[in-house]
Image (tube, coloured by chain):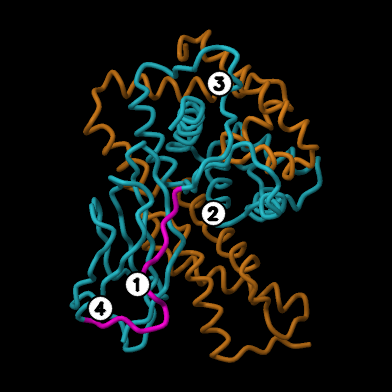
């Protein structure tokens, strides 16, 4: 991670950490308004009003990050307009983890690179990403239900959550060093034959970032 | 036109909304995930009924929005009540505490508070630009959200970050 990027991540982590004890107020905008705003669907004035609110209301700032994580993006992003810096896919909860880690690493302060740098604006680099390596076509055997995923960066550690489609938890694991996990057969007793599991991986990267995968689905035999 | 949905449709609606909720629902709220899904389903069906649609829109964006709104409402409800005894962020903070001494943690909190204070002191347009950039948005996304030209967004992000730097430096939180 270069200096600019590290500084920006520290600032972002610090800002995200302010939500830890935030309580929403009576003047908080409706979640639909936040969603529309972050998707670029509001005109300039109401959008500015919502963003200005999130600058001072850390609970709504958290809601904004949640929406961004879920896929709320302004159309410019999806059109592939040139970006100066694209953030890693930090979820709202992952942001808080990053907040704790980066600020602890920072310790006594944020160290900017030598003057004349324009802080926080660097060319986009390759994005770390987690992809499922489990084919969706064939159902997974109950006695060998192995979930595997791509490695976003060497030395990453993983947290895995697995549930049924109705959100019944099936398994979870933390601190995995290998990009795979076999669901114990007994955990699948709740799953009816042919049912679908939904699973998601979060990775703690050696550079202090935490990234999340999208939700993957697979059928159980 | 009357809303007519069969079991198969409801099952599919539920599956898609559950997936969206699964993606955003924080761990400390997972025991309420089922309630959130139900709320989102009811809102989708109500909205379709009010619009006189025969069937609700099953597009991903629409259902994600419903799941998002229901999740945020539930989070706000819990935060207002302070029901959450052990939240993810607290356990995350505790995890960090395991590895850091109290002095460093106090410094971290001071930095975070400094960022909040310095941000609030920025000129309004720069504050908007920097807020979105701190939320993870690229310059082009800032421009799209606030309906600005790219160049304007770029200038306001640059200048706002420079202001933020000066403010944090004056507070002794950056060098």
In the rendered view, tell whether residue B38 sits above or below residue A64.
below
What number is the disc on residue B117?
A: 3
Residue at 54% over, 90% down = B7
Q: Which residue is mark 4?
A: A188
Residue at 45% over, 51% down = B78
Q: Are marks 4 and 2 in contact (CB under 8 Å)?
A: no
Mark 2 Cα shell of 10 Å, populated few (<14), some (14-19), many (≥20):
many
Chain where mark 2 sits:
B
Mark 4 Cα shell of 10 Å, populated few (<14), some (14-19), many (≥20):
some
Which image quadrant for residue B93? Answer: top left
Q: Position of residue A33 (x, y in %)?
A: 69, 51
Residue at 42% over, 61% down = A131
Chain letter corresponding to the colour cyan:
A
Image position of B25 (left or right of B155): left
Disc 3 to disc 2, C-alpha distance: 25 Å
What number is the disc on residue B72?
A: 2
Chain where mark 4 sits:
A
Q: Is residue A51 visible?
A: yes
What number is the disc on residue A137?
A: none
Mark 1 or mark 4: whose residue is earlier in sequence: 1
The magenta region covers: A128-142
- Closer-to-camera residue (A170/B37): A170
Q: Position of residue A152 (x, y in %)?
A: 38, 51
């Amino acid at each position: 991670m270069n200096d600019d990027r590290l500084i920006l991540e520290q600032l972002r982590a610090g800002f995200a950490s302010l939500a830890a004890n935030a309580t929403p107020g009576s003047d908080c905008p409706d979640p639909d308004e936040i969603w529309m705003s972050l998707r670029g669907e509001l005109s300039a004035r109401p959008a500015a009003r919502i963003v200005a609110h999130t600058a001072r209301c850390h609970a709504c700032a958290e809601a904004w990050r949640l929406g961004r994580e879920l896929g709320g993006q302004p159309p410019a992003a999806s059109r592939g307009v040139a970006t100066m810096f694209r953030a890693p896919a930090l979820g709202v909860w992952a942001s808080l983890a990053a907040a704790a880690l980066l600020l602890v690493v920072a310790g006594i302060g944020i160290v900017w690179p030598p003057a004349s740098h324009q802080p926080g604006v660097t060319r986009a680099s390759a994005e770390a990403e987690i992809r499922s390596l489990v084919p969706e076509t064939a159902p997974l055997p109950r006695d060998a239900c192995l979930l595997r995923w791509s490695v976003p960066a060497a030395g990453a550690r993983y947290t895995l959550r697995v549930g049924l489609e109705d959100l019944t938890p099936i398994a979870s694991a933390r601190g995995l060093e290998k990009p795979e996990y076999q669901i114990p057969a007994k955990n699948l007793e709740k799953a009816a034959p042919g049912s679908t599991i939904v699973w998601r991986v979060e990775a703690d990267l050696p550079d202090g970032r935490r990234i999340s995968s999208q939700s993957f689905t697979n059928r159980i035999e | 036109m009357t809303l007519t949905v069969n079991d198969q449709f409801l099952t599919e609606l539920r599956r898609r909304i559950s997936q969206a909720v699964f993606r955003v629902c924080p761990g400390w709220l997972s025991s309420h995930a089922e309630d959130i899904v139900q709320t989102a389903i009811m809102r989708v069906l109500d909205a379709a009924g009010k619009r006189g649609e025969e069937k609700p829109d099953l597009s991903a964006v629409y259902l994600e929005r419903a799941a998002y709104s229901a999740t945020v409402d539930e989070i706000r409800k819990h935060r207002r009540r302070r029901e959450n005894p052990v939240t993810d962020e607290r356990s995350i903070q505790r995890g960090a505490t395991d590895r850091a001494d109290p002095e460093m943690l106090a410094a971290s909190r001071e930095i975070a508070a400094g960022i909040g204070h310095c941000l609030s002191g920025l000129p309004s347009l720069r504050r908007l630009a920097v807020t979105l950039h701190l939320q993870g948005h690229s310059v082009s996304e800032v421009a799209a959200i606030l309906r600005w030209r790219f160049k304007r967004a770029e200038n306001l992000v640059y200048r706002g970050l420079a202001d933020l730097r000066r403010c944090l430096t004056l507070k002794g939180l950056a060098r």
